[in-house]
Image (cartoon, rainbow, N blue to C red):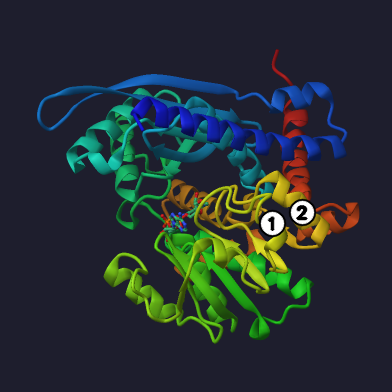
Amino acid sequence: MGDTASAMMTAVREISVFGDAISYFNEAATLLDLEPGVRRLLTKPSRQIIFSIPFQRDNGELEVFTGYRVQYNFARGPAKGGIRFHPGVTLDEVTALAFWMTWKCAVVDLPFGGGKGGVTCDPSSLSVRELERITRRYAAELVEVVGPDKDVPAPDVGTTPQIMAWFMDTYSMHVRQHVPGVVTGKPLEIGGSRGRVEATGRGVSLVALAQMRRMGIEPREASIVIQGFGNVGSVAAQMFADAGCTIAAISDVTGGYYNAAGIDVAGALAYAQEHHSLDGYRGGDHITNEALLELPCDVLVPAALEKVLTLENASRVSAKLIVEGSNGPTTPDADRIFNSRGIVVIPDIVANAGGVTVSYFEWAQDRAGYFWKESEVNERLADVMLENFTKVSDLAQLRGVPLRTAAYMVAITRVVASMNIRGVYA
Ligand code: NAD
């Protein structure tokens, strides 16, 4: 497939992701009786920026990529959201992701709006120096509109702590000040936070264990299936195992590995680190990723890709609880089937908000110039996740709606309250 064709495919796929996000928003907005004017305002981004990024390859050739930054909403604070380096990035995709970040930050009560950015490059085809040049030009183009009080980027698909370090350095050089709080997800040496790497997987397991308690599922008797054994999936697996659960299956891009007696998570992690994947792992029977999603279990954690739980397989999923570690793993059709079958789903905007929560802690530590111990980070992460998850579950019970709808209701109510108190400057 040519570059243009594959970019179009991605655009179509992502527009429909935005469609899914809007459909959840609309459902919650209707239940909240949201005024049409407010609804109009919240379904439009505040600011979309598109620019060219010329850069010179190591061989001297000149190329031009496109850079984006979307600042979706500022009602509760500076925009917050990652930067994606991927050849298929489009304005629609970045807007959809910035829209999502608005609700994710609000549902865990962070003082941020939503943002997202991207560059249409393929990092795997670039040298380290080429990546650095692209990052610095991208940051330089955004100097006036980002900053600790304006918009705070972070890593996303294709970007790393090193890329955040170059971004922070470029911004600091331009404004002639040391400004670590302009981005999060930085290496520890330049103002990153302890506990950031584990934060998303840790948050996933915290809310899952809280919901299991509500459902009367005893951790020591619970079987857990996890799709994806990267940052989110592997940390969540370790946390579940530490709580006494049996990890019945794990998977990565090479397939699933099933062991009814329980996968040895530490052993699997060591194997994956040594071999750069689970390929050839012998601690479980090899199954497909599709079969893994349908295994009988108490808790299923999709932590790899979007749209893996669909109209096609939802009726065969036999978990009691689904915890969305990845973004957008469940299509709205599948979601309806899970609701009608009584399968509880903890939605992505709550389940994987641990990462942005510790990004908020990083921003706060950078601004104070005072860094916390890892135990303090983890304790505060648990407070934020559990307090807000309880609000969402209580509302779901009170209104008789699924957790996803309740999560959007909590998030929208908070954003609208800030908008109303501030008023419209017009
Ligand atoms: P990662 O790259 O560390 O891991 C991804 C895992 O998915 C790997 O094990 C990979 O082998 C597996 N995978 C890839 N293609 C697959 C396929 N076709 N079938 C099955 N498995 C496949 O990524 P991550 O940081 O763990 O993120 C996972 C998901 O969580 C993504 O949707 C991401 O957007 C979301 N998320 C991550 C964070 C974070 O802080 N890392 C925060 C919020 C949301």
- Can you tell which mark lies on residue 424? none
- Can you tell which mark lies on residue 314? 1
For the C terminus, the image quarter is: top right
Identify the residue at image location x=58%, y=31%: 15
* In the depicted structure, whether residue 107 falls above or below residue 383: above
Which residue is nearer to you in this view: 174 or 208? Answer: 208
For the N terminus, the image quarter is: top left
* In the depicted structure, whether residue 183 falls above or below residue 226: above
User: What SS does tag 1 mark?
Assistant: helix
Which residue is nearer to you in this view: 317 or 372? Answer: 317
Of callouts 1 and 2, the N-terminal one: 1
- Mark 1 burial class by Cα count in 10 Å: few <14, some 14-19, many 20+: many
Tag 1 near tag 2, CB within 8 Å = yes
Identify the residue at image location x=47%, y=47%: 363
Identify the residue at image location x=78%, y=49%: 406
Which residue is nearer to you in this view: 346 or 195? Answer: 346
Judge whether residue 229 can be spotted in this image.
yes
Q: In the shown orientation, is residue 189 left or right of residue 147? A: left
The spot of residue 53 in percent (x, y) is 30, 23
The spot of residue 235 in percent (x, y) is 48, 68
User: What SS does tag 2 mark?
Assistant: helix
Residue 59's quadrant in the figure? Answer: top left
Q: Which residue is mark 2?
A: 337
Q: Label 2 amino acid?
A: Ile
Q: Label 1 amino acid?
A: Ala
Which residue is nearer to you in this view: 256 or 209? Answer: 256
Judge whether residue 371 can be spotted in this image.
no
The spot of residue 35 in percent (x, y) is 84, 26
The spot of residue 300 in percent (x, y) is 62, 66
Identify the residue at image location x=55%, y=22%: 47
Q: Separation of disc 1 and disc 2 at Cα?
A: 6 Å
Residue found farthest to the top: 426
